[in-house]
């Protein structure tokens, strides 16, 4: 599939000028074009609310360079420029967040609700020095902040497959204190694909992974989330804030995998104290302490593989993870520039117990052996204006990391440990030759240590075979180092913005999942890999309250050590949309396009995915705090697949999961 329509439409975006529409889209053009760094992107809650997205992974697909791994009705896993899993940082208000499932049923972005979030900040590439890791990028979901006086909102939504979501928030604020409370509920039956079949009907009649009759058309998920935030302002320039969130996800089906989640229970607690304008030297000081935990249980009770077994399941994994940490950050006016510096520490514990009837008679196996990672880091970053047209920014970060297994399995004994010492750095130059035009170039060194799964995982089988691979970690892995170069340009006026960038990454000791030759084993290895890609995004305000928007993104990745493509890399993708918006009423038509992905890793049995195109339409009214939105995604009920892989064996089922078919959705809200 080629993209002539997309190319022609995007050319029109770049040539158009004009405009008289006055509404929030113009504000977004200003923010994205003039207030964000050229290497940054953002997604507003308005864009999320107008979409049928069920989680943040699905919502972020609207941003060029971002895609997701589709496993079922919810819990899509975010991918930035081909980087995914622990190669990117996913944060909430700067808090580290991790899922518990070894097969990533519950990626970090699954563990918060849209109703909590005001905006999502995205950094592409290893340019965030304030947090460890982030080899390929960073996503930080920023929660809502109470305003002065009484405020709040109520949202109700309904769509095909009995998809229902409801949320309510209420806040009250004064100069001395403020607080916020919120609750959200989500529910859905199993979606259908473009061929009219449920996603749970993808398995052959002989497959042991097929769903039982009473589960095929059961609920796909049910999620309750509640949160609260309270803050006091001891003085005009200081603030202390504490927030807590609890999420309970029940009966979440994952056709992509061999098991489903019985439950996911998440707690998040965050406290910050910030004081600004302390002295002419010390401009900002912030202390943050946080804790979060996820308890996750999955099994195959809804699959035929659990039939005729002594228990109600043939395999089960009980997993939990806990993170606690602290940060101390400061901003100092040094010379004619600003120095940002900080010290941070976190501990992540991860424990996963696997039980299987067919191999070990339900004996507990330390799949991830109660393993802990401790990280201590220090960073400094200096930004210096060089005249009126140049800004130079550079920084350095050092991390000490300790990983230790506290249980014994067939791979490691209790007390097995590894130590890592890593250095990250970057240098960025922004040139502004004329007002509204920023040209950005940067070079960076980013690092990340192996996680507990990559180091210590153990999923043994009695007799390894093609149908039951032995999956294990590699305790001798080294940290991955990403040497990356970026160049980009952003041009904006009051009515128009365009952002283009190109990047190249040389990845030393990249941690790659692979099939061990001549055996039925899969594990992790350090390889030399390269990635390069480009993104192009634009938005223009036309006459008659029309807005035209387009995007393109492409990534190519190569396993240089084995001379073959890396797995799970998205193909050439793009969007074109035309929107009428007069500030009260809007209508938008959007075309989504993807090219064929034939650069696949045959070592993992990854197969070619055909190109596709889908159409979405939506319309709505916003008037005096009331909003009504109706939309149809995949208007022509296209049957298609996003790029998929088989890299998550042995629990990946080996059957491709199609994308959702036509979905008519409706939402209404009131904000005061």
Image: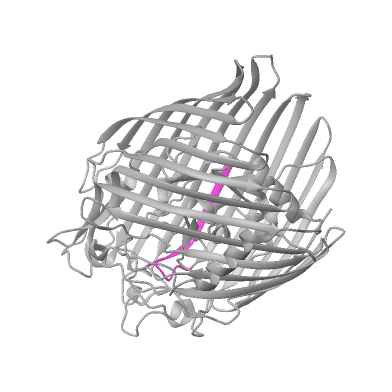
Residue 92 as seen in the image, left or right of residue 357: right
Q: Which residues are magenta?
A: 253-268
Q: On the image, which quarter does residue 489 sit in?
A: top right
Q: On the image, which quarter does residue 274 sit in?
A: top right
Q: Residue at x 26, y 68 (%)?
A: 605
Coloring scheme used: one colour
Q: Residue at x 79, y 51 (%)?
A: 152
State the residue in front, 11 or 327.
11
- The x and y percentages for residue 659 are 49, 73
Q: Residue at x 69, y 29 (%)?
A: 240
State the residue in front, 107 or 502.
502
- The x and y percentages for residue 119 are 65, 48
Q: In this view of the protein, can residue 664 be seen by the observer?
A: yes
Q: Is residue 260 magenta?
A: yes
| 477, above or below 26, in the image | above
Q: Is residue 266 magenta?
A: yes
In the rendered image, the residue lying farthest to the left is 518
């Amino acid at each position: 599939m080629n993209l002539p329509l997309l190319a022609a439409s995007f050319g029109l975006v770049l040539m158009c000028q004009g405009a008289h529409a006055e509404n929030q889209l113009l504000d977004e053009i200003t923010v994205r074009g003039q207030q964000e760094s050229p290497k940054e992107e953002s997604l507003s809650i308005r864009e999320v609310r107008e979409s049928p997205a069920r989680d943040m992974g699905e919502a972020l697909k609207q941003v060029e360079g971002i895609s997701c791994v589709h496993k079922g009705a919810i819990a899509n896993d975010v991918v930035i420029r081909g980087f995914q899993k622990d190669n990117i940082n996913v944060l909430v208000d700067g808090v580290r967040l991790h899922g518990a499932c070894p097969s990533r049923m519950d990626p970090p972005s699954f563990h918060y609700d849209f109703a909590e979030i005001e905006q999502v900040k995205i950094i592409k590439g290893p340019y965030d020095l304030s947090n460890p890791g982030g080899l390929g990028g960073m996503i930080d979901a920023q929660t809502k902040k109470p305003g002065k006086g009484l405020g709040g909102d109520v949202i109700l939504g309904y769509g095909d497959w009995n998809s229902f979501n409801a949320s309510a928030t209420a806040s009250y604020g004064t100069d001395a204190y403020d607080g916020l409370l919120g609750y959200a509920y989500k529910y859905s039956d199993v979606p259908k694909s473009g061929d009219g079949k449920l996603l749970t009907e993808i398995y052959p009649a002989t497959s042991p992974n097929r769903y039982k009759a009473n589960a095929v058309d059961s609920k796909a998920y049910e999620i309750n989330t509640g949160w609260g935030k309270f803050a006091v302002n001891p003085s005009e320039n200081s603030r202390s804030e504490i927030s807590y969130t609890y999420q309970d996800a029940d009966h979440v089906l994952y056709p992509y995998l061999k098991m489903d989640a019985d439950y996911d229970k998440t707690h998040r607690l965050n406290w910050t104290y910030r004081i600004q304008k302390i002295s002419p030297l010390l401009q900002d000081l912030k202390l943050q302490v946080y804790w979060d935990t996820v308890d996750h249980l999955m099994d195959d009770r809804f699959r035929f593989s659990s039939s005729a077994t002594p228990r109600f399941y043939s395999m089960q994994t009980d997993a939990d993870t806990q993170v606690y940490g602290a940060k101390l950050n400061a901003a100092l006016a040094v010379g004619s520039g600003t120095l940002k510096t900080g010290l941070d520490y976190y501990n992540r514990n991860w424990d996963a117990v696997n039980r299987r009837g067919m191999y070990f008679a339900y004996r507990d196996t330390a799949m991830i052996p109660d393993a802990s990672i401790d990280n201590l880091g220090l960073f400094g970053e200096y930004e210096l204006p060089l005249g009126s047209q140049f800004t130079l920014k550079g920084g350095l970060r050092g991390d000490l990391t300790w990983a230790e297994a506290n249980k014994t399995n067939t791979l490691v004994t209790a007390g097995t440990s590894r130590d890592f010492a890593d250095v990250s750095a970057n240098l960025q130059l922004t040139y502004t030759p004329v007002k509204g035009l920023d040209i950005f170039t940067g070079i960076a060194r980013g690092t990340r240590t192996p996680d507990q799964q990559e180091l210590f995982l153990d999923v043994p089988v009695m007799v390894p075979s093609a149908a039951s691979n032995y999956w294990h970690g590699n305790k001798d892995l080294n940290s991955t180092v990403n040497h990356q170069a970026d160049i980009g340009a952003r041009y904006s006026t009051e009515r128009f913005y365009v952002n283009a960038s190109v990047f190249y990454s040389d990845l030393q000791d990249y941690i790659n999942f692979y099939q061990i030759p001549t055996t039925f084993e899969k594990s992790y290895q350090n390889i030399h890999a390269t990635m390069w890609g480009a993104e192009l995004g634009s938005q223009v305000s036309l006459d008659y309250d029309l807005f035209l928007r387009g995007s393109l993104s492409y990534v190519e990745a190569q396993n240089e050590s084995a001379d073959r493509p890396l797995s799970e890399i998205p193909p050439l993708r793009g969007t074109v949309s035309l929107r009428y918006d007069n500030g009260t009423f809007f209508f938008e038509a959007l075309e989504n396009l993807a090219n064929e992905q034939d650069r696949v890793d045959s070592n993992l049995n990854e197969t070619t995915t055909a190109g596709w195109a889908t159409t979405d339409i939506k319309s709505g009214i916003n008037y005096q705090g009331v909003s009504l939105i109706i939309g149809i995604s995949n208007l022509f009920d296209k049957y298609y697949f996003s790029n998929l892989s088989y890299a998550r064996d042995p629990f990946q089922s080996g059957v491709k999961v199609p994308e959702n078919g036509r979905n008519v959705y409706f939402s209404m809200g009131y904000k005061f």
